[in-house]
Structures are given as structure tokens and as C-alpha cells.
Amino acid sequence: MDGSSGYNQIKMDPDDAIDTAFRTPKGNFYYIVMPFGLKNAGATYQRAMTCILGDLIHHSVECYVDDMVVKTKEREHHLEDLRVVFERLRQHQLKMKPLKCAFGVQSGLFLGFVVRHRGIEIEPKKIKAIIDMPPPQDLKELRSLQGK
């Protein structure tokens, strides 16, 4: 699942919101939700997700910023695990992008890796790209490869 408008779902503390003030020809404004450009927006969102899903992480949920995987060992328990996760998200008024959600799949892509019942594997397209890459011919190309 993928969070809808990620950071913009986290409400700003009213005392901190004043610090995000900006002026326009139509008046002065400040953010009431976390804007994308703040220095610690990503870390704050991750911390919020860790607090919201804390006891479920590494048991039935894996979460990285706004990407989330609900995993279940037994097929018959999957709906219950999904219900618990959705209740937590609803409780904190967080929404997911429906078009980027897939349910009841046995494998899927998560952060560039293929997650399956056997474990985690590297996405085959990435392996093919590395195999098809020409070997470096000089020191400059080698350093460029190391930087990738």
C-alpha cells in the first residue's frame, strides 16, 4: 500500500505551525499540515508511522515512509491483519492511494525488491541492467560505476 499525499496527512502542532508562515499579496498564511519541503518532514512522517503501527512492525507490517506491506504467514489470518492495520490508519485519519494498493498477493515489489513467501529477492530488471552494463574501460568510468 502507498500513503496518499504522505507528509500532508500529518497535522502540524499549532505552536510549530507559526514557524512555517509565509506572506503573499493576498495575506499571511501558515501550514496546518506538514509541507513537503521541511527539513525533517521525512523523518517526522516515518516516526509517526512507527508510533501508529509500532507493535505491528516486523510482525504483520513492514513500513518505510509511506510504503507499507501487510504480511501474513497463514492465508486465513490475512484479512484480520488487514483489518487491524486499517483500523489504526482510520483512527489516525491516514489514507492510502487505492490505485497503488494490491491485496491478497503472494509476491510483490517493495522498495525495489521482490517480496515472496521464500524471502526477499532483488528485482530481476535490476540484475539484468547490471549484467548488461559494459565493464569500465578507464579509471574515470570505474569511479563513475562506484558512485552508482
Image (cartoon, rainbow, N blue to C red):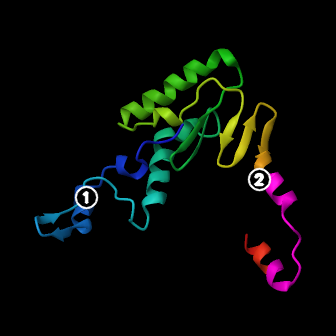
Circle 2 crowding by C-alpha within 10 Å: few under 14, some 14–19, many from 20? few
Residue at screen point 36% across, 50% down: 8
Q: Position of residue 127 (x, y in %)?
A: 82, 52
Q: Position of residue 145 (x, y in %)?
A: 79, 73
Most extreme residue toward the bottom, as rendered? 139
- Foreground residue, 116 or 91? 116
The reply to whether the magenta stretch includes residue 136 is yes
The span picked out in magenta is 126-142
Dot 2 or dot 1, earlier in sequence: 1
| Element assignment for label 1 | loop
Q: Position of residue 97 (x, y in %)?
A: 46, 37
18 relative to 34, above or below: below
Residue at screen point 87% across, 67% down: 134
- Foreground residue, 118 or 26? 26
Q: Mark 2 vs mark 1: give the one in front.
A: 2
The reply to whether the magenta stretch includes residue 56 is no
Q: Which residue is mark 2?
A: 126
17 relative to 138, above or below: above
Most extreme residue toward the top, as rendered? 76
Residue at screen point 38% across, 65% down: 38
37 relative to 122, above or below: below
Compared across the picture, whether 138 is left or right of 44 comes to right
Specify the amino acid type for callout 1: Tyr
Circle 1 crowding by C-alpha within 10 Å: few under 14, some 14–19, many from 20? some
Gap between marks 2 and 1, in whole Å?
39 Å
| Element assignment for label 2 | helix
